[in-house]
Image (cartoon, rainbow, N blue to C red):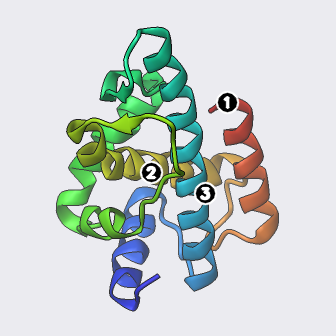
Amino acid sequence: MQVAGVPNFERFFRAAADLDIDKDDLRRCREFVNRKIADLLIRAEAVAKANGRDIIELVDLPITKGLQESIHQFERLDADVELEPVLERITTWPQLDFGLSDETQEQLHVVAGGLCLALARLFPLIDPNVKNPQTRQWERAFRIFDLLL
């Protein structure tokens, strides 16, 4: 991750869940977000195919009510922390059989922001005393998301 994005992530995690993170945490977060974006796109590709399209539209993404709320909260919070431009640079997705619509491509970094917000807010639920998530807490958070998303 580019050093320029580190302060943005630090401010974001502090504002979102009063957490202190380091560069290892930022790497974990980036990997998590890109893995979850890939999972969402794989499901979206199946939805597009079932609907007779070869382009993945934004509505094809399996966005739950909770994730949608996290996306909206991210957009409000991001006005202060300016994480969205960083997410634009670091959000990736796998090679797919179907293409992405322009709207889908433009909004994936906002979905990534919602995932980051949900992740940050999960840590205090896993451990109410956490200030600096450790490997054990990151692994628990990943397992929870893998079960649900």
Disc tally is 3
Given the current orientation, which residue lies at the most extreme top position? 51
Query: Relative to 14, is 149 on the left or the right?
Result: right
Q: Which residue is drawn at 44% across and 34% down?
A: 98
Q: Residue at x 48, y 24 (%)?
A: 62
Label 1 to label 3, Cα distance in Å?
14 Å
Q: Residue at x 40, y 90 (%)?
A: 3
- Badge 3 marks a residue whose secondary structure is helix
Q: What amino acid is labelled 3 in the image?
A: Phe
Above/below status of 129 relative to 27: above
Task: Please tell me which of labels 2 and 3 falls first in the chain.
Answer: 3
Label 2 to label 3, Cα distance in Å?
12 Å
**Residue that numbered label 3 is attached to:** 32
- Badge 1 marks a residue whose secondary structure is helix
Q: Residue 117 carries which label?
A: 2
Query: Relative to 126, is 115 on the left or the right?
Result: left
Quadrant that contains the C terminus = top right
Q: Residue at x 48, y 17 (%)?
A: 49
Above/below status of 59 relative to 105: above
**Residue that numbered label 1 is attached to:** 148
Name the residue nearer the viewer: 114 or 107.
Answer: 107
Task: Please tell me which of labels 1 and 3 falls first in the chain.
Answer: 3
Task: Name the spot of residue 100 as percent of width and height, x first.
Answer: 34, 38
Name the residue nearer the viewer: 147 or 55.
Answer: 55
Above/below status of 43 relative to 50: below
Task: Name the spot of residue 82 as percent of width and height, x first.
Answer: 23, 67
